[in-house]
């Protein structure tokens, strides 16, 4: 991604040319030396530069990373931990993270898994033989280079001959990939702790799931310390190897030499999909079609590389964010804070929910298949350029002349008009949180549920094929109800969720879920609306979208894009007088346009607004 406003143009003599990624405590840039050498430059966020304890930890990270040198680690080439804004430069390694690869392409098989496992053992050997314990081995800290994996980020590593920092009230590490001793006695960990983390990481690589997956960091920690790992779908011989690595007793875990001998027995060829029935839900469409890349898996071009603007989970622009309920309140987040920061192009706030979204160096989101799903013949599109009403905040009798109405899926369709069923497909409303399996909620690196803070809605974890299928299965029941009640179309809301949570989610993941929903809706005879998300208009046919519901497209100067993409079959919602004036002036003779109040309250309620051109 390109540099953002306020980013430095250079650091320590290196010209910064791109942002590779960011985490809670630092940003990683692609830099070039005067000779043209490419490096990954990690720059600490300014506020942390004033934190004495953090400076000490960053200095220890630099020292630890300098001590480690091997084929499967990224060497430090330069650093200044004492600069006003501390920084460190490592060799630039083109490649995506393991979390990114698994999220997009599914679990590893055959040679890929074998190369990963043996490479990580060699990396740990290089790390341990200089007296360093990594302590944060997880999927987003493993880069999948063409010639094998690279272990990165020594942000919370521990050199055994150094005095450990005293950290109060903080959890050092990423719970799903921590060892029991990291919870019980974090200052007494040994290399056996990294072996435990390696066991968890290999289970994740082979299945797409974590062996310890509690609903909160505390529950995950309890599982790590006291419960047996979930090894569902892990085939032999990896299953037996993982069981030994995940022994609660550090002394019972295999040493690296023994582990290397065991891992050499892993098969070099991929196991047929039919032979791993328990994992069928974890295999993405690409794998089912028999497509697997090289160990490095070069990225394919796709929509994520276009430089579009995106919101973070902490901010809202307001575009396309009108929802059906007023914000009541937010639950307090758990006070568990990791201190690891990013290295070599990747943020570290990722593995709390199994996989990553931010693009790694050289990576791009994969485009969906070019072949478009064909709607069933009985699908009926809404009439164009008619009076319509947007009633997702509460149903009421449509005004005379209204021919199209959109309502929440909990309401009955409007009699005598074309009715669209609105479902919250990518987030969970506050009053529906208990209806969802906690394992399907997106979590950060500490295991906290990620919320759209503007609306108090938990975000669904759409990053793996397995979870997308489970989410789709739940949403399909809503689609079935919509069809049974007599709705003519479905409007899956929050399709643009990836633009608000770019640290976790990607466009291709949203499209993959939408394709599942579209296929099911078409089977039920329902047309499917694209809700906002102009970024993905080019893929509308392959995703299976039939018409558009565009909020504030005049305000954001996007109505023309939607009109062209859907041949004028666009239902426009504006929320301001200015936006409505622009919509009516530019598109009043072509598109269906209504102005509603921001909370889309029912007629007669305080604040109700309804205008047409």
Image: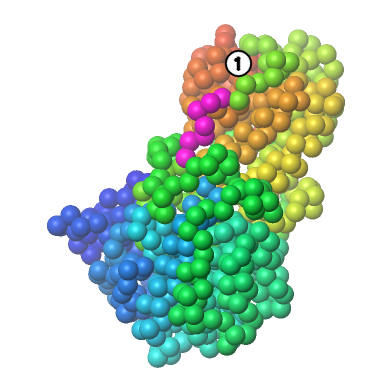
For label 1, the residue is 569
Mark yes or no: residue 475 visible: yes
The residue that appears at 78% across and 36% down in the rendered structure is 478
Magenta stretch bounds: 366-372
- The reply, left or right, for residue 555 in relation to residue 184 is left
The residue that appears at 39% across and 64% down in the rendered structure is 150
Give percent across and percent down for residue 157.
44, 78
Query: Image quarter for residue 219?
Result: bottom right
Vertical order, 575 against 256 (above or below)? above
Vertical order, 305 against 11 (above or below)? above
Vertical order, 596 against 453 (above or below)? above
Queried whether the magenta region covers residue 371, the answer comes back as: yes
Vertical order, 285 against 243 (above or below)? above
- The reply, left or right, for residue 401 in relation to residue 48 is right
Give percent across and percent down for residue 217.
65, 68
Disc 1 residue crowd, few under 14, some 14–19, many 20+, Cα 10 Å = many
The residue that appears at 40% across and 73% down in the rendered structure is 122
Mark yes or no: residue 173 visible: no
Q: Secondary structure at mark 1?
A: loop
Queried whether the magenta region covers residue 508, the answer comes back as: no
Task: Count how many numbered circles sit on residues in the image.
Answer: 1
Query: Image quarter for residue 134?
Result: bottom left
Give percent across and percent down for residue 332.
68, 63
Q: Which image quadrant: the C terminus?
A: top right
Give percent across and percent down for residue 272.
58, 49
The residue that appears at 65% across and 35% down in the rendered structure is 516
């Amino acid at each position: 991604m390109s540099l953002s406003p306020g980013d430095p143009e250079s650091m320590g003599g290196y010209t910064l040319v791109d942002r590779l990624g960011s985490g809670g405590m630092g940003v990683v840039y692609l830099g070039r030396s005067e000779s043209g050498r490419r490096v990954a430059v990690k720059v600490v966020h300014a506020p942390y530069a004033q934190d004495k304890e953090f400076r000490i930890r960053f200095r220890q990270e630099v020292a630890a990373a300098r001590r480690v040198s091997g084929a499967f680690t990224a060497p430090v080439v330069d650093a200044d931990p004492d600069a006003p804004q501390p920084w460190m430069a490592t060799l630039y390694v083109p490649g995506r993270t393991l979390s990114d690869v698994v999220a997009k392409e599914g679990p590893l098989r055959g040679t890929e898994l074998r190369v990963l496992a043996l490479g990580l053992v060699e990396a740990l050997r290089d790390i341990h033989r200089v007296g360093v314990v990594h302590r944060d081995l997880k999927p987003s800290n493993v880069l999948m280079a063409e010639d094998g994996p690279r272990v990165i980020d020594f942000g919370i590593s521990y050199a055994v001959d150094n005095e450990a920092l005293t950290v109060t009230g903080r959890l050092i590490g990423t719970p799903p990939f921590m060892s029991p001793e990291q919870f019980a006695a974090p200052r007494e960990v040994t290399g056996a702790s990294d072996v435990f983390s390696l066991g968890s990481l290999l289970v994740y690589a082979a299945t797409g799931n974590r062996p310890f997956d509690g609903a909160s960091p505390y529950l995950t920690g309890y599982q790590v310390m006291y419960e047996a790992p979930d090894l569902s779908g892990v085939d032999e011989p990896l299953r037996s190897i993982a069981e030994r690595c995940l022994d609660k007793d550090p002394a019972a875990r295999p040493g690296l030499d023994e582990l290397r001998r065991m891992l050499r027995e892993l098969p070099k060829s991929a196991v047929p999909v039919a032979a791993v029935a328990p994992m069928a839900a974890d295999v993405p469409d690409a794998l089912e079609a028999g497509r697997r890349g090289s160990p490095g898996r070069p990225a394919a071009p796709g929509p994520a590389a276009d430089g579009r603007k995106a919101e973070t989970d902490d901010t809202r622009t307001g575009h396309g964010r009108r929802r059906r309920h007023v914000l009541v309140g937010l639950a307090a987040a758990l006070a568990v804070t990791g201190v690891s920061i990013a290295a070599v192009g990747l943020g570290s706030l990722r593995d709390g929910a199994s996989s990553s979204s931010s693009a790694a160096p050289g990576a791009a989101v994969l485009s969906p298949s070019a072949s478009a799903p064909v709607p069933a013949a009985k699908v009926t599109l809404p009439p164009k350029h008619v009076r319509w009403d947007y009633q997702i905040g509460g149903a009421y009798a449509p005004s005379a002349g209204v021919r199209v109405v959109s309502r929440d899926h909990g309401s009955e369709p409007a009699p005598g008009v074309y009715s669209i069923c609105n479902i919250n497909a990518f987030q969970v409303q506050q009053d529906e949180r208990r209806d969802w399996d906690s394992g399907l909620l997106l979590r950060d690196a500490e295991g906290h549920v990620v919320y759209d803070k503007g609306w108090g809605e938990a975000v669904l974890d759409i990053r793996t094929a397995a979870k997308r299928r489970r989410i789709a299965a739940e949403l399909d029941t809503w689609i079935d109800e919509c069809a049974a009640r007599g709705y003519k179309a479905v409007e899956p809301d929050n399709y643009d969720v990836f633009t608000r949570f770019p640290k976790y989610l990607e466009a291709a993941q949203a499209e993959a879920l939408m394709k599942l929903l579209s296929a099911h809706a078409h089977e039920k005879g329902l047309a499917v609306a694209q809700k906002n998300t102009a970024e993905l208009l080019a893929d509308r046919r392959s995703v299976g979208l039939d018409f558009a519901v565009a909020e504030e497209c005049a305000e954001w100067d996007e109505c023309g894009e939607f009109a062209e993409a859907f041949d004028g079959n666009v239902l426009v919602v504006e929320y301001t007088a200015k936006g409505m004036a622009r919509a009516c002036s530019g598109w009043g003779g072509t598109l269906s346009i209504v102005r509603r109040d921001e909370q889309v309250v029912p007629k007669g309620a305080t604040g109700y607004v309804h205008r047409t051109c």
